[in-house]
Image (cartoon, helix red, strand yellow):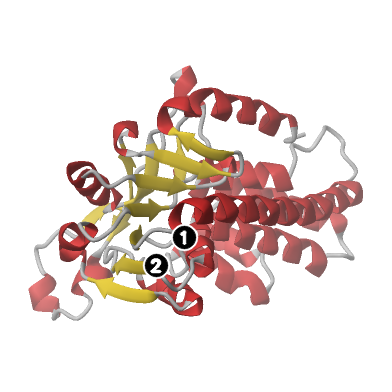
Amino acid sequence: MEKEKVRSLLPAATQSLFDDISFSRVLGATRHTDMIGQMINSVIESNQDDPQKAFDAVIAVSEYFKSTRGTQSRAIYNGINLMVPRPAPEVEAQGFLNDVQTRIKSYKSQAAEELNKIVAYSKAIFESMRAVMVFDFSSTVAAVLAALPSSVRVYIPESRALDGGKPFVPYAQKAGVKTHFIPDTAIMHYLRECQAALTGAESFYPDGTLFNTIGTDLVAVACNYLNVPLYALTPLLKVDVRPVYGYIRSSPMPYDFVERLAGHWSPEERENVDYKGVKLLSVSPQLVHAYITEEGIIPTAGLFPIAMKYNERLEGKYV
């Protein structure tokens, strides 16, 4: 279904959430999944007098995001499937909608529990360090950042491509840590001061391949060169097992950076320049020290069996 058609199915109060995702005004796969849950719930609440209309809209909104953001982030695809199960033939609309609302509440509760575990495991590693670097906004990393003691210094690169560094700053301020906001060009220089670098994940493969915002590869290479461990903080929900079976790989998220890079240029200065690029890229598992998940701190080499076992349980919850 076309973008504007899907947007029109939403109540006016939640159309802004749709726009925030579409225009990358809000970042992070975990936050996007939660926002999609809010949109789906609002569709149900605003169509209580017409369950079939609500049913059709819920399916349309779900399938739209699975075919767009879901191709870029497996967490979003998996999260939507957990909230909106595959409808059985001739399913009764109201019963289906009640189930969806129950699943949305369950998803939020489970996600909060998993986040608390990731924060606890992360604090055990990072709270005794002198300094860490965090790259590109992730709500999971932000929660860890907010829980760090004030003795830890935090370096935040601007992550200019999507302005992903700035959203970290309030969390660092809340923690009372000494915060350094630096240009991306200074990553290598200040990484020498750090004992670890932290990043989130859009998705990851069972072999440890990390997918995240453009620029993460530069941080990973710099970490490898300087022997600074790079940790990926993510719930296991973000696992993408499709490459194990050899049939689909993640989308690179094409993006036109014209407003980000040349928004202040004159029309004449913009002429005959290509600003198109990608928002998402892969980082080799050899460059990721470990994944910190709700199951613990997992060295990349040991991730495969844990990821595959989790996915088996996950798929059993889809229906």
What amino acid does circle 2 point to? Val
What amino acid does circle 1 point to? Glu
Which residue shows up at 42% across the image and 64% down it? Answer: 24
Q: Which mark is residue 108?
A: none
**Closest to the observer, 9 or 214:** 214
**Closest to the observer, 32 or 167:** 167
Residue 171, image x, y percentages: 48, 73
Labels 1 and 2: the sequence-earlier one = 1
Residue 145, image x, y percentages: 47, 65
Q: Which mark is residue 127?
A: 1
Which residue shows up at 13% across the image and 71% down it? Answer: 270
* CB within 8 Å, label 1 to label 2: yes
Determine whether, in the image, residue 204 is placed left or right of residue 104: left
Residue 222, image x, y percentages: 20, 48
Q: Where 124 falls versus 236 (above or below)?
A: below
Q: Quadrant of residue 50?
A: bottom right
Label 2 element class = loop
Q: Where 151 falls versus 76 (above or below)?
A: below
Classed neighbour count for the residue bearing mark 2: other residues with Cα under 10 Å, few (<14), some (14–19), many (≥20): many
Q: Quadrant of the C terminus?
A: top right
Classed neighbour count for the residue bearing mark 1: other residues with Cα under 10 Å, few (<14), some (14–19), many (≥20): some
Residue 105, image x, y percentages: 78, 56
**Total number of numbered discs in the rendering:** 2
Determine whether, in the image, residue 17 is placed left or right of residue 97: left
On the question of residue 71 being in view, the answer is: no
**Closest to the observer, 73 or 22:** 73
Q: Which residue is mark 2?
A: 152
Which residue shows up at 9% across the image and 63% down it? Answer: 272
Determine whether, in the image, residue 24 is placed left or right of residue 267: right
Instruction: Give the spatial CA distance, label 1 vs label 2.
Output: 7 Å
